Amino acid sequence: VVYFTATFPYVVLIIYLIRGVTLHGAWNGVKYMFTPKLEQLVNPQTWINAATQIFFSLGLGFGSLIAFASYNHHNNNFERQAVAVSLINSGTSVFASVVTFAIYGFKATFNYESCLE
C-alpha cells in the first residue's frame, strides 16, 4: 500500500504534465511562473508566506514526524535523511507548480482568445 500511495501522485502529475504542456499557451504559464518579481524580495509578507508554506509542506507542526522518528535506528544518518526529504519536498513542489502553471497558461490563453472572438 505504501508503494502505491507514495508513487501514484507522481504518476498523476506526470500525466497532467504531459497533457498540460501539449495545450496551446501552456508555455506562457510556465514562463510566467519563472519570471521573477524582484521587488517582492523586500516585502516581509513574502518571507512570512514562504516560511508558512515550508512549515506546512514538511509537516513540522504535526506529530507524525516525531512518531516516525521513534522507529528510526540510532545509527541512521538523520542529517542525510533530512536533506533528502527537504529536497524531494522542494522538487515535488516545483514540479507540481510547473504542472499547475502550464494549465493556467492554457486557461489564460483560451479565455483571452475567446474574448477576442
Image (cartoon, rainbow, N blue to C red):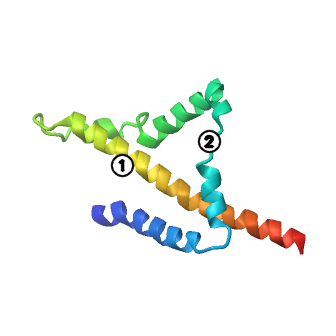
Residue occupying the point 10% across, 35% down: 75
Residue flagged by tag 2: what amino acid is it? Pro
* Rendering coords of residue 25 (x, y %): 68, 67
On the picture, is 25 further left or further right than 14?
A: right
Is 69 in front, or is 51? 51
Residue flagged by tag 1: what amino acid is it? Ile
- Are the residues at dot 1 and dot 2 in contact (C-beta closer than 8 Å)? no
On the picture, is 73 further left or further right than 103?
A: left
Q: Pick the quarter of the image with the N terminus.
A: bottom left
On the picture, is 29 further left or further right than 65?
A: right
* Rendering coords of residue 11 (x, y %): 41, 69
Is 22 in front, or is 69? 22
Is 49 in front, or is 114? 114
Q: Which residue is mark 1?
A: 88
* Rendering coords of residue 19 (x, y %): 55, 74
Q: Pick the quarter of the image with the C terminus.
A: bottom right
The answer for how far apart the CA atoms under marks 1 and 2 are is: 23 Å
Label ID, residue 17: none
The answer to whether residue 67 is visible is: no
Q: Which residue is mark 2?
A: 36
* Rendering coords of residue 69 (x, y %): 24, 38
SS class of the residue under badge 2? Answer: loop
Q: How many marks?
A: 2
SS class of the residue under badge 1? Answer: helix
**Dot 1: within a 10 Å radius of its alpha carbon, few (fewer than 14), some, or many (20 or more) residues?**
few
Q: Quadrant of residue 44?
A: top right
